[in-house]
Image: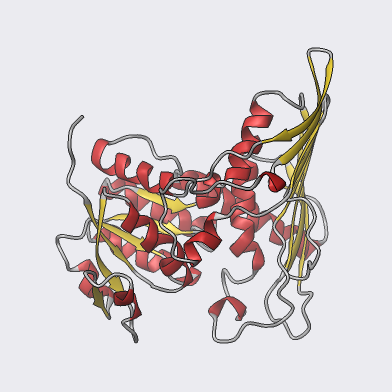
């Protein structure tokens, strides 16, 4: 097997996404070398990555000819500007979800990536949640028969307004739909493709809130009903997934353990990484070849590192992207349709 040099990489932020997700994953993968992390006012990144250079301006990253890949993990309203500058500078780009604030902005970046012949992808890491990979296999294997209803929840209990974060400030790309919805809608599109139509309600439930913290989206497919919901005011969570088919049902509780492990500075790629205790395994009640089957399905071990493995292979070996920018653009298209539906209080075509 041909040996490739590591991809020299820069992070544009060391906030939550940089510290918890991107930096640990890049550090754990031998195919990447983090050279620079952009921190405008602090140098906290050196605590865990003493060999990485902390820079204070974007131009220091763009002007470094050694850097091949830039991770645009900055606030949503900067994605178009920073990703455009990175592509113009001849860099490959990974954009944190959501891809952009509008479909029009996504089209600009896709066109630019084709013009510059540089890899452009979006960090839809939740495709590598163990629960989602297990659910996808249950559906594709026909274990519940033809799916007629799919319901997904991504709930939290956060009854306060977080201070000193752009995520709680109104503006383009703010709110729970762009934040958590971009993951959930990406999963729906992976499983079922584009919906024919949808009806959505989006709003503010927390007292004193100024950005959306709740959504309920109902999507229409031929002989399939899809429900996607999220709220910051769910103290007693229900199922993460519930899938009903003509033969049976699959129900899964619990959140993927990788994020919590990363927050505890555990190393991705180690033995038992991404595995769940049996108490969180999904339950299956179905019929197989005329026999009633009821029991648990062991959750596949999740692995966010596989996202960056694919990025490495795409850049070094020209392999197909797992998360194409066109797919990420369709997520934004569904978000725009949901916002239109909520504003007009009606079902809209997608």
Determine the image quadrant of residue 177: bottom right
Determine the image quadrant of residue 59: bottom left
Q: Is residue 222 visible?
A: no
Q: Please name the residue shown 48% across and 71% down the image.
A: 16
Q: Position of residue 31 (x, y in %)?
A: 26, 48
Identify which residue, 50 or 107, lies in the foreground.
50
Instruction: Please tell me whether residue 64 is drawn above or below residue 111 in the rendered image.
Output: below
Q: Position of residue 70 (x, y in %)?
A: 30, 60
Q: Please name the residue shown 76% across and 48% down the image.
A: 198
Q: Is residue 172 visible?
A: yes
Q: In the drawing, does residue 108 fall left or right of residue 201?
A: left
Instruction: Please tell me whether residue 57 is drawn above or below residue 323 in the rendered image.
Output: below
Q: Which quadrant does the N terminus fall into?
A: top left
Identify which residue, 275 or 240, lies in the foreground.
275
Q: In the drawing, does residue 109 fall left or right of residue 224?
A: left
Identify which residue, 17 or 74, lies in the foreground.
17
Q: Position of residue 155 (x, y in %)?
A: 72, 62
């Amino acid at each position: 097997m041909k040996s490739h040099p590591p991809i020299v990489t820069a992070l544009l932020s060391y906030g939550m996404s940089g510290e918890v997700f991107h930096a640990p994953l890049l550090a754990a993968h031998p195919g990447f070398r983090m050279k620079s992390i952009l921190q405008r006012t602090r140098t906290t990144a050196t605590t865990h990555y003493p060999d990485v250079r902390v820079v204070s301006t974007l131009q220091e990253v763009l002007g470094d000819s050694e850097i091949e890949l830039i991770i645009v993990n900055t606030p949503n309203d900067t994605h178009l500007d920073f990703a455009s500058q990175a592509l113009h500078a001849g860099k490959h780009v990974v954009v944190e979800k959501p891809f952009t604030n509008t479909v029009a902005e996504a089209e600009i970046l896709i066109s630019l990536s084709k013009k510059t012949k540089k890899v452009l992808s979006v960090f839809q890491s939740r495709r590598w949640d163990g629960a989602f990979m297990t659910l996808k296999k249950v559906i594709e294997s026909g274990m519940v028969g033809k799916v007629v209803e799919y319901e997904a929840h991504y709930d939290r209990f956060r009854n306060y307004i977080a201070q000193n974060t752009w995520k709680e400030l109104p503006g383009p790309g703010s709110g729970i739909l762009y934040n958590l919805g971009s993951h959930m809608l990406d999963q729906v599109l992976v499983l079922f493709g584009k919906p024919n139509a949808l009806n959505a309600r989006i709003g503010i439930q927390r007292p004193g809130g100024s950005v959306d913290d709740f959504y309920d989206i109902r999507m229409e497919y031929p002989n399939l009903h899809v429900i996607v919901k999220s709220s910051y005011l769910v103290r007693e969570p229900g199922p993460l997934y519930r899938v009903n088919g003509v033969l049976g049902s699959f129900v899964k509780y619990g959140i993927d353990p990788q994020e919590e492990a990363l927050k505890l500075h555990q190393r991705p790629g180690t033995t038992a990484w991404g595995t769940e205790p049996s108490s969180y395994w999904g339950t299956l009640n179905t019929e197989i070849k005329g026999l009633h089957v009821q029991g648990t399905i062991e959750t596949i071990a999740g692995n966010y590192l596989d996202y960056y493995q694919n990025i490495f292979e795409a850049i070094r070996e020209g392999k197909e992207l797992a998360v194409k920018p066109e797919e990420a653009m369709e997520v934004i298209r569904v978000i725009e349709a949901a916002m239109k539906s909520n504003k007009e209080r009606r079902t809209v075509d997608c």
